[in-house]
Every structure is written in structure tokens, then in C-alpha cells.
Image (cartoon, rainbow, N blue to C red):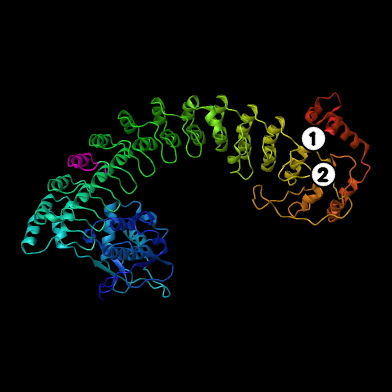
Amino acid sequence: MARQRWWPEHLPLPEVIVVPLDLSTTYFGSKFKSPLLCFVCETLADSTPAARVGHFHHFYLKEVNRSNMQCLSLKSVPENGKQRIINMAATAANTQRQTIGCEEYSLYSSLSEDELIKMAIQQSLEEDSAGQPAAQSPQKSLVARAGEVAAPSRASPHNPPYRIYPWQRETDPVVAAIRDGDEKAVCNMMKSGKNLSVPNKDGWIPLHEAAYYGQVGCLSLLQKAYPGTIDQRTLNEETALYLATSRGNLDCLLTLLQAGAEPDISNKARETPLYKACERKNAEAARLLVQYNADTNHRCNRGWTALHEAVSRNDLEIIDILVKGGAKIESANAYGITSLFVAAESGQLEALRYLARCGADINTQASDNASALYEACKNGHVPIVEFLLSQGADANKANKDGLLPLHIAAKKGICEIVSMLIPVTSRTRVKRSGISPLHLAAERNNDDILEELIDAGYEVNTALSEERSCLYEDRRTTPLYFAVFNNNIYATELLLQAGANPNVDLINPLLISIRHGCLKTMKLLLDHGANIDAYISSHPTTFPATIMFSMKYLSVLKYLLDLGCDAGSCFECQYGNGPHPALNYRRERLNDPQVTREPTVVQFCEMVSTPEISRWAGPIIDVLLDYVGNVQLCSRLKEHIDSYEDWAVIKEKAEPPRPLSHLCRIKVRSLVGRNRIKLLDTLPLPDRLIRYLQHDYSQ
């Protein structure tokens, strides 16, 4: 059987290839599901010439299953790289489908990298003369090693296996000689008239190869033979000096610099050899480049200088080399971020101390006005915050949103930082921001922070500014609302004990606790003066919103009525026994800009007629009748009661006159008053009478 490449050599390479969906996101390591495929793709992801992976064996597909496939763009990939990606995508697709099953991934976990490489090569050299796949299932291989006989694999006639052909890439003899450091072979090639300055499809010339592999002897030969190529770039605009630096080949680096290589030529990302040395934390390379007048203030395409990179890696030796070599410590990138800002943001304390000693601005701010202190607080770097404050950093510099470092520390829940910031933060600046750190602590359930702020004297009834309140659909304003909304009983109790007013917000927090069904929170709010007859001004009703919110929870409804909630207003219908207008079930959002008309006042009979509540109408009315005297049911309520035979008793219950004992109970409760209704059990009355007044039928 003849062997052939997966992509014919006589055809131009495509701009797009088709690969399986699970391989289309990316064609290297992190997205693959097995160690074997990760190894293959790490080889592919290497930015070296094709010859560098030539000694590996790979599979190529002859037939491709068209189902479950997706296009992968190759427009920005060099020609030689396209061929490698095409071949490797075919390899990965075939290997994954034939050797890696979803249940088999764990079989590779115990194998070392060397064993995985041997397995890949062994599988690639096998070829089934009967047309079966060359690679054996790893599960079967492992079973066979355990001494068991594996069942023969049979392919389905409806889904035949891929036909694969092993193929080995030929290594360029020039590259092989350079890689092995064979100076004699390189000399012989030059003497034979071979031009060793011609780039390959990746733009690499032998000089690049020598710099990459660290073969200083070959590098010297090539540089002397072709002095004009010393600064020649690859297709990625990488010079030999850049490649030597990126690989840490100091001998090659020094040789190139001594031969006159330009140290400030950058690659496509505008990264110079000096930047690369800082990235790799190679102090010797950085020192050499600075000695040969490399620009210490050159910016990459992100606006970062070599100093930014060195600071982000906390490499004091390189930082010292750069600063002494003329690096500007106040140089900022496109976002206004200086080196000191980077140190504070990333938590590099030693670098921060060094820059501060050099006179860097402690109060530096980025283009969004965030200070170095703010970023350190946001990222939870306690030692950085402590050092910045000791150096006089201003804790009252706000970012573009008006937030201070104390705000972000309270939001992140970092107690140590909050403790350091409270004494140095201006209450006036906090008030001017339109939001208290109490709001942020309550919103994020940071109870320790909340308690510390309360102990420090922060006002618990501080309201959000109108601009910040509008960011929430419910127009919340107080820290108490945040705590109740989160169903945080501890925070709710903290705030109420500190004097929080439960009747400030547009939507009373009591209504939120009813919606949550949390009796403990309800009791806390009512004990601290929450309005049991709370209404929502933006959604007016003729009866308390507390009843509206508790209609589906009869036990909660009875609890509220026991404490004096007004039930009589539910039976005050303006239409009485007359005809009622048609119902409109359209819901309106609190901040819907399209709702411009005045909200319509909703009556109780209209509310219980909605599809969500109508099936509960009878039991709701039955409970309410226990807390009212002689009332008249409107025609719509009667219609609901008549719709179910079982509710006939409710209609009889509502007929006046009500029992005298019941009317007396209503009168006594009215005279006691809502605020003292909880004290009924202290009256000098018989227990049976007190239970009757409290609607307690437990005995």
C-alpha cells in the first residue's frame, strides 16, 4: 500500500481546514483531553522551524468523516506553519477518535512523559495490513500487559475506520548540522558553494537556528560568512539576538552584540530582547544588553517597558540594572499605569520598596483614577497597603466611579485592610461618594466588616444617592435593605440594634422578608418598628402590601393579622355590588421607562382575581374574615366564592351580623392598639379569654 501525505504537495495550502468540533477551539495543549494529545500539540505550538519536529512520527488521514466537523482559520499562519497545523490536526483527530475513548483518559495518568512519547512513536510505526487502524486501543494494550487476552477489534460496516499512513518529515541537513553543533559540516557546506543565508518558509536562516540552539561556534562561522544577516528577521520579526535571548543562550547573545547586532529591534509584539530577558528573569542577559546600550524605555504594543515587566516579576536584580541603565520609573503605559502601580497591583512588596526609595510617586493613579492604594486594596495585598499607608499614601483618592479604597476593601471583605483604612478615610469624602461602605459590606454579606464599620461610628441609615439607587430595579437605598434582601439574619439584627430605620426604602424590607418567608427576619423588623401596613408608593393598592405579598403563604398572613395588620381595607371596594371593570393583568417594572401614565390603584378583589391568586381566593378571604367585623363582600368576591362549592361556608361566614363574641374581640383588639397587641398576654384576664383575643385555637 502506497504511503502519501494527507495534503498533496502539488496543491497550494488552504486558508481554512476542517477539524472535529472538539478540536476546533484551538489546536494546542490546553483544550485536548488526553496527555498523549497534549504532548503532540505542545510540539506543534513551539515556534521553531518545521525541521525541529521532524524526528517525530505522525499520522495523516486519507478519509475524513464529514459529521461533527468545523472550520479552522489559517489566514494568519505562515505557509510552513499551515502544513504543520493541517497535518497535526489530522493526527489529533485520528488519534483521539481511534485511541482515546472518554472512559479511557484515566489510563494515561500513571504514565511518565517518556512512556507517552514511546507509545506515540510505537503506535505511529504500526500498520495493519488488513486495513484496520494502526494504533491499538490503549485500554487493550494495558489489558494485554496485564496478561489478559484482548478481544479483536471489529469495525462497524456503517462507520468504517479511518485509513492512516505513517510519514516522517525529512530534516534539513543544514539545520541538523547546526542543531548538533557540527561546525565542520557547516564549513564544508559553505565551501561547497551552498548559500546559507536563504530563509525558509518561516523566514528562518541558519543564523537564527544557531542562535536558537545556542551553538556559538556555528553562529560565529555564519556571522562572519554573512555579516549582513546579523539583524535579519524571521516572519515573526524575530532577530537572532532576540532568539538567543529568549532561549537564554548567553554566549550567542554576547557574540552577536560584539559583532554589532542592534539590541533594540523588536518582534511583532514590539518586544525587544531586553524585554524578553526581563520576562525570562535572566539578569545576565539584561545586564549584557544594557551594557550594549539597549533602550531601557522601549515600549511593547501594550505600552509596557522592560521595567514594568521586571517589576511584575519582582526581580530586584533586573530592576536595579534597568534603573541604573536609565529606565524612567514614572513611565506609564497606555492606561496610565506606572511601574509602582504594577508593584502595588500585583503584590510585589520588594519591588515596591525599591521604587519608593528611588522616588516613585506613591499616589500614582491610572487613567481611570484608580490609585495604587486602591488596587492593592482590591486585590487584598495587606502588606502592600500597610507599606503604602506608612509612606503617606492618600486614602481619599477616589476612582472614576467615586469609590475610595475603603469602599473596595469593604466590598472584598478584607478586615485587616478595613481596619487600617478607617482612621485615615474622610467621612466627608465617603458621604460625597453617594454610597457607604456599609452598603457594600451588607451587599456582599461581609458581616465582620459590617460590625467593624458600625463600631467605628458609620451611620446605619445612610442612603444611597439617587444615581446609585437607580442602578437597582427596586430602588433600594439603605444597608438594611441589602441585608434583608440577602436573607442575612445576623446582619439585619446588627443594623437594627444599631438604630437602622426599617421604614425608609421605597419597598419596605418587611415585604422582602415576607417574600422570603423568613419569620425570624419579619419578627426582627416588626420588633424594631417596621410598618405592618406597609404600602408601595409606585404600585398603590387599597389594602396593605404586606397582605398582597403574603397571599400565597396563609401561615404568614395569619401571623401578620395576629399582630394587627389591617384586614378591613380588603373589603372596602368602590364598586360594591355593582359591575366591575375588566381586569388588566399587565405587569409593570418599577423602572420601566415606557410606563409614563400614573399607576392605577389596585383593589383587593382585583388582586385575588389574577390567575396566580384566584385559586387561593377562598382560603384567603376565610382567614381575613376572622379579623374583621360586619363587612360586605363585593360582587367580584362573591363570584369567586360561588365558583367553588366548598367555599359556600365562607359566604355564610361573611353574612352579617357576625357573632357578638367575635365583634367584641375585634373591638378589644382595636382599643388595645397595634403597637400593644403583642402585650395581650400580660392583661389580667383568664387564659382562655386571652387565647381567644389572640386567635389562638391550639387548645
C-alpha span from label 1 to label 2: 14 Å
Q: Is residue 265 left or right of residue 660?
A: left
Q: Is residue 316 above or below residue 101?
A: above
Residue 293 colored in magenta in the image: yes
Q: From this view, report whether residue 569 is shown above or below residue 228.
A: above
Q: Which residue is mark 1?
A: 564
Q: Which residue type carries mark 1?
A: Gly
Residue interval drawn in magenta: 280-295
In the rendered image, the quadrant that contains the C terminus is top right
Which mark is on residue 570? 2
Residue 175 in which image quadrant:
bottom left
Left-right relation of 334 to 456: left
Residue drawn at x 13%, y 58% is 177
| Amino acid type, label 2 | Cys
In this orientation, does residue 36 appear?
A: yes
Task: Return the x and y of residue 203 as percentages of the image width and height.
Answer: 22, 60
Instruction: Tell me if label 1 and label 2 are in contact, CB under 8 Å.
Output: no
Q: Secondary structure at mark 1?
A: loop
Q: Position of residue 550 (x, y in %)?
A: 73, 43
Name which of mark 1 and mark 2 comes first in the sequence: 1
Element marked by disc 2: helix
Mark 2, Cα crowd under 10 Å, few <14 / some 14-19 / many 20+, is many
Q: Position of residue 172 (x, y in %)?
A: 17, 63
> Is residue 377 highlighted in magenta?
no
Q: Is residue 590 left or right of residue 617?
A: left
Residue 338 location (% of width, % of height): 35, 38
